Image: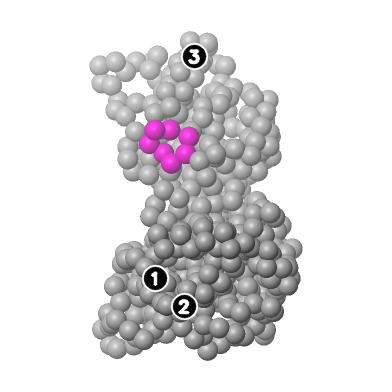
């Protein structure tokens, strides 16, 4: 992700004379350089914009530069906002307005009219903010001193969300076969998704994957086995099953890389010519930041890849997840998340084990190998993207993952246990009311605010279930949002 950068566009005007403009440009370059050392991505000073043409030109350049993931604006002086209209109206990249000023304090002894003419961000940023509101532009407004950690953290988080947009716009999903039969929530309008989110979602035959698997050499499998044994504890004597997963992983990765795909889906109902459902193979591909969705769920596959990109620099912990069962003992209410085979080891609390077990669902000829582990504790979110018919809804719920309260020695899958907000039963009611799917992306790295930013940039509906959410408040919110989105 480090190939991305952000452009710093500073507003001013010719009214102040060349000396002031030179000072503004020098300060802007200084700020960009210092901030680049604190932020997750480089901030590049581009221009002190003084005319409509300068603003339009830099926006056009940003739109067509693949390395530019967004623009950050700031008005050191007053910058008449009419000259921003043409540029902002054509902007196609994420946009953050950093409302700050060069100096932290008012200099009691030095403040005079020269100081006042130069340092006009307090009203320059308000003029700039008005035109974005007038144009009804999706943007992030961050107010605070540019050298303060809080402002830098918020700007860095926004940058990561903007990178999620860049990844989304180039997302290609490889579907092996179709969706699980008769399931509604894994369906969706692929044309609408490509229009709104940029995803290219297409199908490849399972037979094509089998053909690629048959071309994998023993030497390639040996090399992949060395990676497995270095990363995981082998807790099975069925080495042939592990080697088969290695063959599946190598073949899937070759096909995805050849097509430029960063996510894939499959279904246990369509394993034509395959002995095992990819378990370990899918898990290790997710550990390499590919997205995955079970049962043909291409939406969660793409979202897994996007959250992994947004969380880069964290602990790598974003994973395909499913609410599997509840613990409903009063005072000890928890959700147990798992899947048949495919949970990313990035969320593991310890070193995962490779095990082989019978899988009593699907068309497996042999026992699939998979990674088994407990998930780590910590604050996290679960994310679900659903198609509401004519629009997309992104649902985010705050959770707190815990060390599982019981060992579950006979459960042969990876598992994560968590407390849902505001509590399990209310959280379930709210999730179901909002139409949340049974598949999610669980992330320790990405925040709800970042997902809100991402949804705003992508122009889709956002629903957040928090410690303060009630079913009654949520029903009212969904009713109003339904009306608003139908008017858009």
Query: Disc 1 versus disc 3: distance between alpha carbons?
Result: 64 Å
Residue 80 shows up from this direction: yes
Q: In this view, does 49 lie above or below 93?
A: above
Residue 388 shows up from this direction: no
Give the image location of residue 376, x and y in percent: 33, 67
Q: Which of marks 1 and 3 is nearer the N terminus?
A: 3
Give the number of the disc on residue 238.
2
Give the number of the disc on residue 234.
1
Q: Are marks 1 and 2 in contact (CB under 8 Å)?
A: no
Classify residue 373 as left or right of residue 197: left
Residue at x-position 64% and y-position 54%: 257
Secondary structure, magenta segment, majority class: loop
Q: Is mark 2 on a helix, strand or loop?
A: loop
First to last magenta residue range: 36-42
Residue located beneath label 3 in the image: 22
Query: Disc 2 versus disc 3: distance between alpha carbons?
Result: 71 Å
Give the image location of residue 65, x and y in percent: 65, 36
Residue at x-position 52% and y-position 45%: 1
Q: Which of marks 2 and 3 is nearer the N terminus?
A: 3
Q: In this view, does 42 lie above or below 354?
A: above
Between 38 and 150, the residue placed more toward the observer is: 38
Classify residue 334 as left or right of residue 137: left
Classify residue 156 as left or right of residue 278: left
Q: Are marks 2 and 3 in contact (CB under 8 Å)?
A: no
Crowding at dot 3, Cα within 10 Å, few <14 / some 14-19 / many 20+, comes out as few
Q: What element carries label 3?
A: helix
Q: Which of marks 2 and 3 is in front?
A: 2
Between 197 and 349, the residue placed more toward the observer is: 349
């Amino acid at each position: 992700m480090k190939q991305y950068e952000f452009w710093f566009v500073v507003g001013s005007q010719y009214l102040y004379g060349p000396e002031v403009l030179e000072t503004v440009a020098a300060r802007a370059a200084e700020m960009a350089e210092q901030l680049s050392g604190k932020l997750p991505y480089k901030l590049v000073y581009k221009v002190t914009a003084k005319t409509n043409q300068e603003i339009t030109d830099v926006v056009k350049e940003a739109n067509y530069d693949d390395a530019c993931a967004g623009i950050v604006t700031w008005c050191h002086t007053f910058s008449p906002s009419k000259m921003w209209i043409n540029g902002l109206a054509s902007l196609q990249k994420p946009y953050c307005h950093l409302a700050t000023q060069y100096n932290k304090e008012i200099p009691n002894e030095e403040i005079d009219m020269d100081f006042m003419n130069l340092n006009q961000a307090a009203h320059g940023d308000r003029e700039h903010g008005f035109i974005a509101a007038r144009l009804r532009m999706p943007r992030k407004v961050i107010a605070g001193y540019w050298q303060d950690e809080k402002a830098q953290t918020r700007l860095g988080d926004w940058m990561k969300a903007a990178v999620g947009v860049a990844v989304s716009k180039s997302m290609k999903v490889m579907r092996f076969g179709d969706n699980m039969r008769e399931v509604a929530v894994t369906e969706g309008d692929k044309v609408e998704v490509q229009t709104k989110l940029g995803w290219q979602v297409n199908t490849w035959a399972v037979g094509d994957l089998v053909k690629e698997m048959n071309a994998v050499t023993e030497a390639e499998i040996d090399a992949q086995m060395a990676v497995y044994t270095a990363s995981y504890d082998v807790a099975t004597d069925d080495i042939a099953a592990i080697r088969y997963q290695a063959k599946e992983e190598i073949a899937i990765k070759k096909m995805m890389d050849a097509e430029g795909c960063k996510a894939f889906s499959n279904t246990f109902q369509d394993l034509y010519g395959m002995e095992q459902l990819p378990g370990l193979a899918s898990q290790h591909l997710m550990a390499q930041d590919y997205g995955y969705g079970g049962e043909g769920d291409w939406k969660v596959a793409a979202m897994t890849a996007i959250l992994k990109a947004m969380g880069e620099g964290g602990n790598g912990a974003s994973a395909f997840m499913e609410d599997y069962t509840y613990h409903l003992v009063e005072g000890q209410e928890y959700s147990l998340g798992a899947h048949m085979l495919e949970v990313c080891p990035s969320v593991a609390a310890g070193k995962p084990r490779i095990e082989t077990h019978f899988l009593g669902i699907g068309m497996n000829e042999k026992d699939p190998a998979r990674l088994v582990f407990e998930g780590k504790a910590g604050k996290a979110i679960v994310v679900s993207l659903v198609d509401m018919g004519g629009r997309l809804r992104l649902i985010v719920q705050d959770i707190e993952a815990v060390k599982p309260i019981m060992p579950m020695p006979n459960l042969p899958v990876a598992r994560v246990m968590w407390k849902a907000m505001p509590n399990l039963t209310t959280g379930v009611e709210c999730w179901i009311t909002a139409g949340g799917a049974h598949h999610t992306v669980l992330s320790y790295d990405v925040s709800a605010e970042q997902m809100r930013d991402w949804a705003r940039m992508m122009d889709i509906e956002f629903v957040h279930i928090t410690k303060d959410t009630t079913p009654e408040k949520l029903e009212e919110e969904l009713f109003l949002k339904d009306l608003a989105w139908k008017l858009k």
